Amino acid sequence: MHSNHEFQGKCKTDPLEERRKFNGLSEALSILGFSEDQKGLIYRVLSSVLHLGNVYFNSLDDQLAEIANPKELRWVSLLLEVEYDLLKDMFSFKVCVIHVAQSG
């Protein structure tokens, strides 16, 4: 898995060092009492955030946008177990929420 975050800087990463850091994170989560299922969920959420950072949009008008690279959003939908079309709509349509304060 790659993200744009990796390529924005000019630093090089050592795969063995990255593996060591990941193993340290996994061990720390185990020490804190996280189960393997919980750790898997944490990894999926973190991966989703990285993939969302790779999503680009094309503006269709002032109310609509389209996903320029739907493959990244498909990864997010798989990782979060959310229907792709629902996720796509969430990122494609402008929504206005009006909060009405109750008096009393």
Image: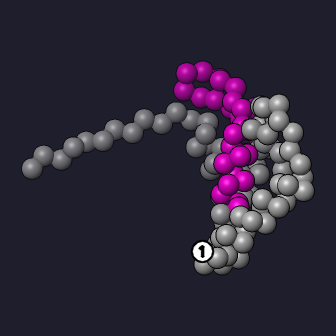
18 lies left or right of 88: right
Q: Is residue 97 shown in magenta?
A: no
8 lies left or right of 64: right
49 lies left or right of 97: right
Percent x, y for residue 79? 72, 59
> Considering the numbered disc 1 on the image, is that residue within a helix, a strand or a loop?
loop
- Residue nearest the observer in this picture, 32 or 89: 32
Q: Residue at x 77, y 37 (%)?
A: 4
The segment highlighted magenta reads 43-70
Vertical position of residue 62 compared to residue 33: above or below: above
Percent x, y for residue 70? 77, 41
Give the quadrant of residue 60.
Answer: top right
Q: Residue at x 74, y 38 (%)?
A: 5
Residue receiving disc 1: 32
Q: Is residue 45 shown in magenta?
A: yes
Can I make out residue 69 in this image? Answer: no
Q: Residue at x 82, y 61 (%)?
A: 20
Give the quadrant of residue 31.
Answer: bottom right
- Residue nearest the observer in this picture, 52 or 86: 52
Q: Residue at x 67, y 76 (%)?
A: 30
Percent x, y for residue 77? 70, 54
Q: Identity of the amino acid at label 1?
A: Leu
Can I make out residue 86 in this image? Answer: yes
Percent x, y for residue 9? 78, 31
Vertical position of residue 70 compared to residue 46: above or below: above
